[in-house]
Amino acid sequence: MSKLTLSPAWQALTAQQLRIAHLSLRELFAADATRVQRCCLEFGEILLDYSKHRIDAETLRLLLALAEQAQVPAWIRRMFAGEPINNTEDRAVLHVALRSDRATFPEGRDVMPAVRAARERMRRFVDEAHRGALTGATGRRITDIVNIGIGGSDLGPRMLVRALRRFHQGGLRLRFVANVDPADLDATLAGLAPEATLFIVASKTFTTAETLDNATRARAWLEGALGRSADLSRHFAAATANEAGAAAMGIAPERMFPLWDWVGGRYSVWSPAGLALALAIGMDSFEELLEGARAMDAHFHTAPLERNLPAVLALIEVWYVNFFGAQSHAVLPYSEDLRDFPAYLQQLGMESNGKRVDRDGTEVDYATAPVIWGAAGTASQHSFHQLLHQGTPLVPVDFIVFKEAGGDPPAHAALVANALAQSAALAFGNPAPGAPHKALPGNRPSNLLLLKRLTPHALGQLIALYEHKVFVEGIVWNLNSFDQWGVEFGKQLARTVLPRLLEGGDAGDLDPSTQALLKRLRKRD
Ligand code: F6P
């Protein structure tokens, strides 16, 4: 057994789970008239109701003891101090600097001059575009922006451009291309005017095959329409930490926006990787997003663990994953604008903590990141809620609800009512005597995150909340949440399979199944 699972805090939680696992949520509520007050935390625009969880005061005390044992407060300070906590890449983790307004940060390794300079350059570029001064090779105004990027260089900006569609300004149309499947770029370019289209090539490394392939095809599309002699650099910008790579693709230096090695891709939407978002909503709204995240950073950095929203959310996740064997977590935004949020959280949570080796390189003997999935409510209710209510897997759920919506209040009220009803039905069930097929067992846990309105500021808080939740989980599981070595071998293998697929030749080094599939794929039909 590992140091963690042998540890006093872990052992105490194991015993505690045996003590309360039989207690239903109905019994936990009945036993404590102050439960709702005690199990609600509020910060900024977010109210977290965690009362519908299979925990009591003693469980939370023991979970907080586990966090203390894991030295969560010290690790938080280390991150904010810019220490190289990404130990396998020997890098600091400073996405919080991207939304900081401090003159210098962190002490002894000030990155703020670079951050401010980049933000200023983004503002000038966005203003130029919104004024109609951004023109292509023919002098025509740029009206369509296509972000070419994948993973962290796509999911964040794509999710937020949709989520903040009520805050769009400047009249630009935004599209996103990520997949190497040519259908993605082809469908995106269909109907676009090359003269009026600008591509943002977003890639921290500028080595990602899909992004480079799509950017090359986009260049060919422009060249085909505008001619080889046209100044195509007017149709490109890049967000990257690899200026040489961008230059090699013909990106003009004044159109290169920096990323840094101390920002992980999945934590980069606050940086120039969010340029497409800034073009959609304007720099003022982009900075409101940063402000919201900054507020959550201050809360996370200073609030005691028992009142710290990210820490409490993380510990509840550990409770179910490690002491109830939950293998997945559903995130259900009751907001069509926030439909892509679960996909964003998949990369954030699963690429950060989907690991089986701890910081010391030892294989873990405990579960780590659950599978994160979800969809927008109420559509989700007519899809997989059957399983949530009557299925066999234990799936903790996050409901994300906005008190006020941009649209029709009665319709919005119906949306909110459904979220409350679903959360209650999961928790308290419905006996249905004599009709077992109709009975809901209940006792199914959920958080409810209630926000006032969907605004850039509120979303900044919400996303930072989940970023820090993932960080605390990684600390408790003793993982480096900021690398992703597991994705490299598949890419490498694809690079060896591709030439065999295209040109044939010996594939003896590949497994028999792949060899046979290559043979079938190369066979003329
Ligand atoms: O393959 C995974 C990954 O490295 C992610 O971590 C990253 O967000 C994505 O690919 C894209 O990387 P880049 O921004 O360097 O193109």
Image (cartoon, rainbow, N blue to C red):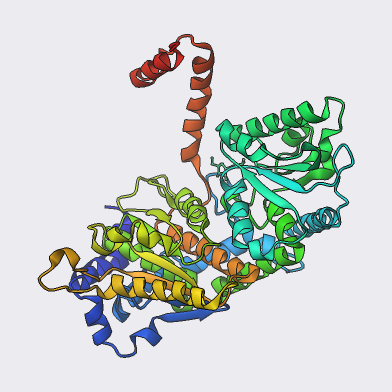
Which quarter of the rendering shows the C terminus? Answer: top left
- Left or right: residue 125 versus residue 183 is right
Residue at position x 26%, y 57% from top?
Answer: 393
x and y percent of residue 389 in the render? 27, 64
Residue furthest to the bottom in view is 33
Residue at position x 33%, y 61% from top?
Answer: 385
Residue furthest to the left in view is 434
- Left or right: residue 75 versus residue 367 is right
x and y percent of residue 367 in the render? 32, 53
Report if residue 102 is visible in the image.
yes
Residue at position x 83%, y 39% from top?
Answer: 234
525 or 489: which is nearer to us? 525
For ligand 1, the image quadrant comes to: top right
- Left or right: residue 239 versus residue 328 is right
x and y percent of residue 186 in the render? 62, 34
x and y percent of residue 494 in the render? 50, 26
281 or 201: which is nearer to us? 281
104 or 157: which is nearer to us? 157
Q: How many marks?
A: 0
Q: Is residue 245 above or below residue 380?
A: above
Residue 435 found in image quarter: bottom left
Q: Is residue 396 above or below residue 498?
A: below
Residue 193 found in image quarter: top right
Report if residue 94 is visible in the image.
no
